[in-house]
Image (cartoon, rainbow, N blue to C red):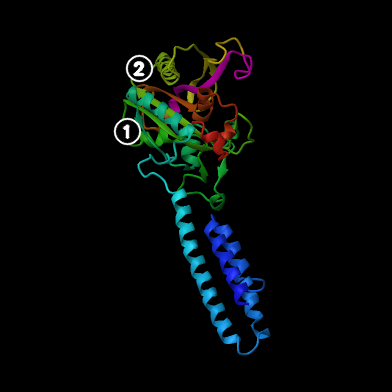
Amino acid sequence: MKDKLKKIKDEFLKRIKECSSLDDLEKIEKDYLGRKRGKITLLFKKLKTLPPEERPSVGALLNQVKKEIKERIEKSRFQLRDREKEKLSFDITLPGKKIELGHLHPITQFLEKVIDVFLSLGFEVVEGREIETEKYNFDLLNIPSEHPARDVWDTFYLKQYHQEKIKGEGKLLLRTHTSPMQIRAMEKRKPPVRLIIPGRVFRHEATDPGHETTFYQCEGLVIDKEIKVTDLIGTLKIVLERIFKKKIRIRVRPSYYPFVEPGLDIDMQCLICGGKGCSVCKQTGWLEMLGSGMVHPQVLKNMGLSPEKYSGFAFGMGIDRMMMFYYGVNDVRLSYSGDLRFINQF
């Protein structure tokens, strides 16, 4: 047995010398010290077959060889681990990986462009509440409860207040447009005023590539003495040219909005096809950009102003739709999808 033990030890030393990985080392350890089939383990099991007088000396030798094999395996394990760490080490002088930072949503980016244009023209930026009352959202804007135009704004009423009147201002609701801030802003201001009200609005309507239940508007209000329709048209043409950074053609169409008289829709010649007609402009050559008009005399009175002394114009532009034209987006719903494949393009 002593000769066999010497042969096993020599074999082990040769294998451990050639060992080049932790996986190989695990196999060697199992081959020699495995609890069931290890070569040293099997020799220990054969001790009982030796004559009694030989067992002490052979047993001592087996324990010694087992100890040496264990120590050599542990030493090799540390060496191999250090070697693998060296392979994984890196040069600390190399530049690190670029940290990806978040960025502004495309609607926010475009809204900031719009605000910058108005600031350059001397407008004041005013922000308003998203939860409004019927009084400010409708009544003071010349849209009383029985007015058929009220259906156009298909409103989200707050459930807990659906049947309640709040301090004589009607039910609470999610604002359907940013126009209520015209009245609220003028409660603390006197003409002349030039202001815009950017913000989020809500309407209970079916969604499609051009419509969402939640979207952004930018309301504008100008009031002074002797404000005319030509001031409205000229201002909006300049604004659109500065937003899209090119000379554009516009056309003005009559329209109806209860809080302005006359009401006007401003169209812009399609920038994609140059007015020839394409899928974006539905082959018309024109894109509807915003609604506007001269502030209704009744609304001026609700602001505490005399229609004989003051006049003004108001307009509202849909930021989501203008963003789509600006960036070439074909579905407004992508903006609210949370899909990073869309967001990361901007």
Residue 189 or residue 140, whichever sits in front: 189
Q: What residue type is labelled 2?
A: Glu
Which residue is at a point 63% across and 35% down the rendered structure image?
207
Magenta span covers which residues? 278-298
Q: Is residue 247 above or below residue 33?
A: above
Asked which secondary structure carries label 2, the reply is: loop
Q: Viewed as shown, does residue 60 lie left or right of 239?
A: right
Question: Gap in Å between the C-alphas at discs 1 and 2?
Answer: 18 Å
Residue 291 or residue 192, whichever sits in front: 291
Query: Where is mark 1, residue-wise?
Result: 189
- Where residue 286 appears, x then y in whole percent? 57, 15
Q: Is residue 22 above or below residue 102?
A: below
Residue 129 or residue 97, whichever sits in front: 97
Query: Where is mark 2, residue-wise?
Result: 226
Asked which secondary structure carries label 1, the reply is: loop
Question: For residue 114, which quarter of the picture?
Answer: top left
Which residue is at a point 59% across and 37% down the rendered structure image?
154
Which residue is at a point 49% across and 36% down the rendered structure image?
139
Q: Is residue 83 above or below residue 51?
A: above
